[in-house]
Image (cartoon, grey):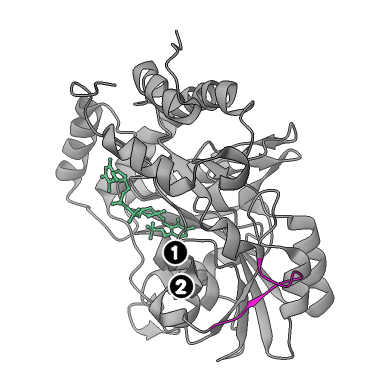
Amino acid sequence: MNNENLQPLYVSSPMLPNIDDVTSYIQEIWDSKYVTNNGPMNQKFEKKLEEVLNVPTALTFNNGTIALLVALKMFNLKPGSEIITTPMTFAATAHAISWNGFVPVFADVLEKDLTIDPKAVEKAITKNTSAILATHVYGSICDYEALEDIAQKYGLKLIFDAAHAFAAEINGRSVASLGDASIFSFHATKLFNTLEGGALTSPNLKDKEIVQLLRNFGIKNEEEVTHVGINGKINEVQAAIGLLNLEIFEEERAKRKELREKYSSFLNDLPGITMQPNPKEFKNSEQYFPVVIDKEKFGRSRDEIYEALKKENIFARKYFHPICTDFEPYKGYDIVSTCATPYVEKVKHEVLCLPFHSGVKNSHINIIKSIFIGCKSTIMN
Ligand code: T4K
């Protein structure tokens, strides 16, 4: 294989709006001299977000991590209480729990889609548990019905880290409306981005007030600060990029859907390769394309495929290995499981996210295919 002419191909690539459109919005912002603090662009952006995500409350943030911090703050959970989460997520999920002074308790994941296992969650509940923080990892939607039942049965708050699930729907329901609150990341690596950014959504209109307060230092008015808030605001340029990207993200999602089909066409038949389930009742965000590679059945390991791709200038990612409990702050934390050995300890060595965005060309797919199947063949448009 000779890949000298191919530029590096990364797992993600930001969807960027037309630069002339950005310039024209920036001119408008410059003329108004209103550049941040919930200005007119942000207000317009939030209104559109609420429409797209079909929720009464969608408030923007400067990143997904601060949105997570606020989501865990807004419900007045018992200080120092336990919050059950998944180890198969980005570090920010666990950090938001610890940063707020809560104790993360890790529960195993389901083999079918690597989301948190509701049975393990129920097993992890103690008298000190106050909430569940579940990640729709790779855009696969958690078993929200089982989690909602558990949350109701034990009087827990249910918060979703939906960083990977922008505009996803399940059974006709917007993912942003699940549980008590959800957060999204609008980082450059996400399907929908504002370069850096995020959002907190809630199915309840009444949550708007507390989130607005917490996002803006807890300032109620010029003379009153009523809550321990933070600075979670986006600026007007980010809001403008958000407005422009809302107009084009469906086009990007459609291209990724096609790419999913192209990848699936050759991976489907390979023994030992499992792809993310994509059932009919699910409208996929098309954020990531993870594959699980079982070395015994496939013949080669995840790490061998990762290295082979790298030699071709193709940079897949081993998200999320190491898992949170491998990281220094959480070393020694148990993973509650219904199995003798948590499934996540096995699958963390097997999962690989392939490049997944509209910049992936057929020439790339052909190289990736040849690495997986070990021979050359061509995918045409
Ligand atoms: N919860 C979950 C489940 C999350 O996945 C995340 C973020 C959060 C919460 C927190 O949300 P934020 O606070 O970030 O809004 C990246 C992202 O930085 C991070 O946002 C994301 N998850 C995580 C899964 O991926 P890295 O360390 O992998 O990023 P990096 O710089 O290695 O980028 C990945 C690839 O993307 C690069 O190889 C090249 C490409 N890329 C990246 C950037 C930044 C570009 O092509 N252009 C770019 O501008 O964390």
Q: In the rendered structure, does residue 224 fall within the stretch colored magenta?
A: no
Which quadrant is the N terminus positioned in?
A: top left
Left or right? Give the position of 328 relative to 24. Answer: right
Asked if residue 336 is among those painted magenta in the image, a careful observer would answer yes
Q: Relative to residue 131, is residue 90 drawn left or right?
A: left
* Rendered residue at 48%/87% (across/down): 101
Query: Which contiguous range is marked in magenta?
Result: 333-342
Residue located beneath label 1 in the image: 322
| Label 1 CA crowd tier, 10 Å (few <14, some 14–19, many 20+) | some
The secondary structure that most of the magenta stretch takes on is loop
Name the residue beneath numbered marker 2. Answer: 326
Q: Which residue is found at the position 45% from the left and 85% from the top?
A: 226
State the quadrant of the C terminus: top left
Q: Is residue 14 above or below residue 87?
A: above
Residue 107 is situated, as x and y percent measured from the top left of the image, at 65, 71
Residue 14 versus residue 213 in the image, above or below: above
Residue 366 screen position, x and y as percent: 41, 19
Under mark 2, the amino acid is Asp
Badge 2 local density, few (<14 within 10 Å), some, or many (20+)?
A: some
The answer, for residue 47, to whether it is visible in the render is no
For the residue marked with disc 1, what is the amino acid?
Pro
